[in-house]
Structure formats: C-alpha cells, structure tokens
Amino acid sequence: MADHPAVEVSDLCVSYGSAPVLAGVALTVPAGTGVCVTGENGVGKSTLLRCVSGLQRPDDGRIRVFGAAPGSSPEFWAAVVTTVEPPTWYPGLTTREHAELICRAHGQDPDDAGVDEALERFGLAGHGDAIPPSLSSGQKQRLTLAMALLRPSSLLILDEPEQRLDPEGRDTVARMLTDYLSTGGSLLMASHDDKFAVASGAAITTMESLAR
Amino acid sequence: MTVIVSLRPVRRWIHQRQVSHRERGATLGNLYFAALLIAVLGAVTHKQISKIFWPGTPDLGILPAVALGLLGAGFLLMAMRATGPVTLGRPAAYFLLTAPVSRRRLLLPSLRLAALVAACLAALIATALAGHAAPHAVAGPLIAAGALLGVGLLLVAVVAQRAHGWARVTDRLATALAAAGLALLIADNLAVRSRPATGGWLSRPLLVTLAGSLAVVVAAGSALIVRDLARTPDDRVLDAAKTTGTIFDTAFGMEPSFVTDLVARRYWSNRRLRSARPPARLPVLTGQDFLLVRRRLPRLLWLLAATPIPLLLTAAPPWVAAVAVLLGAMIAGGTTTATVNTDAGNPVLLRLLGLSSRAALLQRLRIPVALAFAWSLIALVLMQVAGDLPGGQWFLLSVPLGVTGGVAAVRRARAGFVRNDLLPLDTPMGTVSTGPLVHAFAGPDALILGVPTVVAVGQGGPLTYTLLLFQTALALIGARAYLAGTTDPARVELRA
C-alpha cells in the first residue's frame, strides 16, 4: 500500500447531461500527505471526490487508490473513509449506537475504540441517547466526522468538512486532521475555507490547476 | 491483508438495538393488523379475485394470452430495472456498504427478496393467463414455468445492473416486450379476434418436463449470479438504495410526489439538452411548456402507443372505454404540468415575471389542453375506425374532452403535497386517513366535466349535435369556472 500514492487520477472526464463538469482532470495525493481541492461552486470538487470514492462512475479516465481501482471491495473500504454521501440514520438507533455501529462494522471493540471519548471531543457527549435526526445540522456534521475518525483508515475523503461547524468546531476538526496526517494517514478533501485547509495540514490546490 | 468483518453479528446487533427501543408488542400488533386487513379484503373481494385469476372456463384466445404475457414480462423487467434490483436500505448503504464486509453476504438478502417478489408476481400473471387461456388441468406446470421465468428476468436485470453495456440492451428489451404485447393485443382486437383454444395444448407430463428444464437453467443462472454478486458496483447499489428508500417513503408517508420528483430528477439529469428559444409569438409560460414538450419525445411516443388502449376494453361495458379516453387525455395533458407543480409549490418565477395566478394559469393551460385534445382525437378516431362507437362524428368530442383533460391535468399538478391534517374517517376496518384520498382525487375529479360523453357512449346511441353542443358548453363553462374560482388577477400564488 505504501508503495503507491494514496490517490492517482488522470484524464478524468465527467459530464451531467450536456454539461461537462470534469475534463481531463489529473491529481496525485502521495501517501501520508493531505491535499485540499478548492474552487468555486459547481466546478466539480464533489464530483471528483465521489469518483475517487467509487460512488460515481466517470465517463472516462483512470483512478487508482493505493494502486487499485476504487470501490466495491472490503479491502477498499477497510482503507478509505468518505463523507461525500450524507448519512441516512437507522430508525430507532441513538447517536451513541450509530457511533458504536461504525466500530462493529469495522471489526473494532466499541469500548476499546473510544466511542465516548470521540463523542466528548466533538461536543456530543450530552446527546448520546438522542436520535440523530433530532440533532442540529451542525451536530449532525460533528457526528458524521466523529464516526469518520473513529474507525481505522488510511485515507480520508472529506467533502467540505468545515460546513455548518462553528469556529471552535472547525479548530477541533482541523487539529484532528493534522493528528491523522501525522500518524501516516492520507487526506483528500474539498473546502471553501483556505484557513481551515492550512490548519488541517493539507496542501491547497485549485480545481483549475488540475484540469488539462 | 484486510480482515473481513463478519456481517451477521453486526446485522443482529442493529436488529437487537432497534427492537430494544421499540414498544413491546409493536411488531406483533403490526402483524395482527396486516393479517386482519388481508383477511377482511380477501373476504370482501374473493369472488372478484377468483374471476380475475381463475374463471370457470377458459375465455381468452392464445394470441391475447401471449400478448398479455409479453406485456407482463416487459413491465416486470422495467420495474426490476427501475428498483435495482440488487439494493440495500439507505442506512445500510451508508454504514455497511462502506465497511470491510463480504459484498456477497451484504447483497444476498436483497437478491433473495427480489427473487421471491419476482417469482410471486410472475406466478400471479401466469395464474391469470393460465386460468383464462389454458385447460385447468395443465395450469400447474404453466404457473411454475411463469414463476421461473420471473426469476430468469430478475437474473437478466441483475446482469444489466452490473454491466453498463447490458443495461441499455435490457431496457430496450423490456420496451420491445411491452410494445410487442400491445401490438399483438391491438392486432387481435382489430383483425384476428382469436377464440379460446381448448385443444392443441402440450400434455401435462411434457409441460412438467419443460418446467423442470427451465428450473435447471434458472438454478444454474442463479448460481452464477450469486457467485459474481460481489462485482455489483457500489454506485449502482447506492442509486438503487436511494430509489427503494424513496419508494418506501412514498408508501409509508402516502406522498407520491417523492417518487415523481426522483423520477423527474433522474430523467433530466441524463438528458443532453441544448438551450433554445421558444417561439416569440407564444406567451412566456406557454413557450416554456412548448420547449418542455419538445424535450419529452419518449413520453409522447408512449402516449401515442397508448392511444389504442380504449379499443382493448371492448369486453367491458362501453362506458369503461369512454372513461379510459378521459383518463388518457388527462395523462397526456400532464406531460408538461411539472412546471405548474413547481409554480404552485414556489411562485418565485411568477413573481419575477409579475404574472397574476390567473394569467399564469391561462398560459399554462394551453399545452396540456392541446396534448389532451390530440390524444383524445386519435383515440376516438381509432375507436370509430374499429367500429367500437355508434354512428356520428365522435372525433368532434375531442375538443371538449381536450379542455376537460387539460384542466384535470393542471388541477392534479396544483394539488401539491398530501394533506395529513384532514380529519380521518372511522370505518369497520380501522381508521382511514382522508388526506391521501383527497389528494388521489384532485385532478381526476375534474373529469366529471366529461360525464355527458361517458353516458352517451354507455347508452350506445349515435352522437347527436345536442350532445356535442352540451358537452362543449359544459367543458368550456367548467374550465372558466375553474379559472375564476381558483385564481385571482390580484394574487400571484398558484396553489389550488
């Protein structure tokens, strides 16, 4: 895994109907580093992230994640975490149980994985018994990020993680992403907040610079 | 080396947690209610059901039976393609599809359920066809073969979901099956009129052998599909999860707009459009609808293919065909009324244009009325040519029926969301929510303006000019009253 870049994209083309969104996009995220893609609305940041996650089929181009095609295998999802899809919550499960589910689905013991600490760190300790739909949009975003960082992974693919977070929340997330990178993880994210991206330890690149 | 997490304990844990939060006995209560509902409905409708599925003697020719079989297979394949068929619940798609678990084990329950549903639906169709067209002694193997063919169609749909190249071929196959079925039905109705075939059927042992051979083929195909189930791409499973989730939302929330919104969003996201200017002589909103109708060619073709449907209802009382013409006109008129739905939900465009609700509705009515007119004109001409209508120039009624269909389509589009704040009705079978009922009739209720035509066709007399005049006056007065009663020159909001 370490022999390959975390993400390698070349000649990526995607269009919606007659509107081309990505045309000949190329991007490399070396393993153990972070890259933040910026650009105006509709420039294709989320589409790029969805393709790298294997949750959208590109019209053309080549994508490799740790040297293999993305998606559809347990190996891929053991290494990759993504927040490009908004979560849909299980009816009748609490906030804490959703976090616990993430641990169980990734073969971790919930007690050892530190579910309570993660909820505490994201300011959700008092909402452990609430159902996620009753949380505010900012709290749901915190829960999504807490779950993403709770499970073991080698690559984080985050779509505007700073969205709906208050300044304190942004600082917390940025610190955690820096820690993630320092332990050998790789990061690919899209963001509109350059300050947050820098604080997260990611190198900033624009979508315009990625197109041929 | 990645450790694959065992899926069963995770699923069991989710189930246990959900059950622990549920009210004690809630599941049993739901099961009891479902069983009671089935028992009551069965008791009330068992005679009608037996007539539909198992008449005393065969009464259908072999040609219409084949045609209905093709139609059933086509629509079943289309339904399976639209829903996945390999899918997951939306929470499972988020939490389990992105986990290091066995893809085959993750997707297998969905495939199993889809196979069961496909087999049951195909067996139902086969039962009806065998009951109507075959000697009852050979119905058993025919029904079994039908169920197996249903599973076979499911396997085709699963391959199409997995392989991009097969998807288009399968969709075209489904359309071709349905179109061939419709064409055969029309041919039988107009020319052949085949009678029930009492003899000439294969013997029961031979049919059993054929069904057995089919079972072997389907079993082999199923084994191959299950072996490669893990190769179903994540993006396809995710799409299917969103679709089935929306269908469940619609079913539980009794809110059909969830599905129609999803279908419309997917339809337009896959279309390659080129910006164009509507004809300058048309009012602005009519021009917008004109562009829309030009971009909905597939729907227009389907509507055209559906114009002979009233012809196929000759076995029913004559008024049924007249009601079918009215309903068809309303559906044809609905080709462009998504714009009315948008305006009714959010009148921001009307505010930008500075249009009153009356002016906006007048402009929005034109294309639906024109489409409803064209549909009823073709349907009535076909019925007249086939000799299904008594003497007179019945096609002249397409003008008032066009107005009626257009008004009904626009009224339907303005209905908005289901109102769940309406008082429920207490019935011996339980409480019935009136909101969905009121919503279901918003639109079709305007077809009451076409009652004179329905009565005239039902009575079987020739068309008189008095009826033509009365029907035209009623449709025009009704449309005028609808405009006056539901819009205001001093109001922008279009909601009914």
Image (spheres, rainbow, N blue to C red):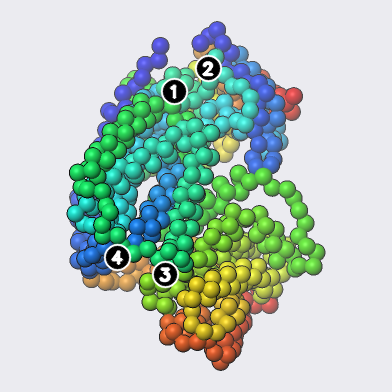
Mark 4 and mark 3 lie on one chain; the one further toward the N terminus is 4
The residue depicted at 39 percent of the width and 26 percent of the height is B228
Q: Nearer the viewer, mark 2 or mark 4?
A: 4
Is A163 situated left or right of B15 in this image?
right
Q: Is residue B487 positioned above or below A19 on the image?
A: below
- Given residues B75 and B249, the one toward you in this image is B75
Is B5 situated left or right of B466 in this image?
left
Q: Looking at this view, name the residue that lies furthest to the bottom.
A: B466
Q: Mark 4 lies on which chain?
A: B
Q: Looking at this view, name the residue that lies furthest to the front.
A: B200
The residue depicted at 58 percent of the width and 78 percent of the height is B395
At label 4, the amino acid type is: Asp
Mark 1: which secondary structure?
Answer: loop
CA–CA distance in space, label 2 to label 4: 61 Å
- The image's mark for residue B27 is none
- Given residues B141 and A202, the one toward you in this image is B141
Q: Where is residue B494 in the image (x, y as percent from the top left)?
A: 61, 69
At label 1, the amino acid type is: Ser
Name the residue tied to disc 2. A68
The residue depicted at 26 percent of the width and 71 percent of the height is B427
At label 2, the amino acid type is: Ala
Say if mark 1 contacts mark 2, CB within 8 Å: yes
Can residue A134 be seen here?
no
At label 3, the amino acid type is: Leu
Name the residue tied to disc 1. A73
Q: Position of residue B324 (x, y in %)?
A: 47, 71
Name the residue tied to disc 3. B313
CA–CA distance in space, label 4 to label 3: 15 Å
